């Protein structure tokens, strides 16, 4: 076993830091999202409008909603 396989099996790397992007949590979401989420749930604004107000795309918005609702 060598290289990446070894790192995945043991959880260690040469430098001690894991590689890759850290996973986002609900606390990492922007304040704009949290502010408009209740309005979206109450059907006061659409998801498209919420995406524009939050400054993100629809795909990102759906990812954020899923992340926020898991908590």
Image (spheres, rainbow, N blue to C red):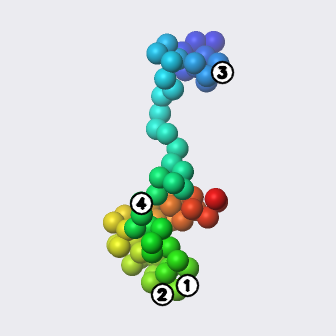
The residue located at (55%, 20%) in the rendering is: 4
Does any portion of residue 5 appear in the rendered image? no
CA distance for labels 2 and 4: 20 Å
Where does residue 55 sit, x and y in percent of width and height? 33, 66
Foreground residue among 38 and 1:
38
Mark 3 closeness class: few <14, some 14–19, many ≥20 residues within 10 Å: few
CA distance for labels 3 and 2: 49 Å
Q: Please tell me whether mark 3 or mark 2 is closer to you in this view.
A: 2
User: Which of the two labelled residues, at mark 3 and mark 1, occupies the earlier sequence position?
Assistant: 3
C-beta proximity under 8 Å, tags 2 and 1: yes
Quadrant hosting residue 57: bottom left
Q: Which residue is mark 1?
A: 42
Q: Which mark is residue 9?
A: 3
Q: Which residue is mark 2?
A: 44
Where does residue 52 sit, x and y in percent of width and height? 34, 72
C-beta proximity under 8 Å, tags 3 and 1: no
Q: Please tell me whether mark 4 or mark 3 is closer to you in this view.
A: 4
């Amino acid at each position: 076993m060598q290289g990446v396989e070894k790192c995945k099996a043991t959880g260690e790397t040469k430098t001690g830091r894991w590689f890759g992007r850290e996973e986002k949590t609900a606390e990492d979401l922007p304040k704009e999202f949290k502010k408009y989420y209740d309005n979206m749930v109450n059907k006061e604004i659409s998801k498209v409008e919420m995406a524009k107000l939050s400054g993100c795309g629809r795909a990102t918005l759906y990812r954020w909603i899923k992340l926020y609702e898991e908590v």
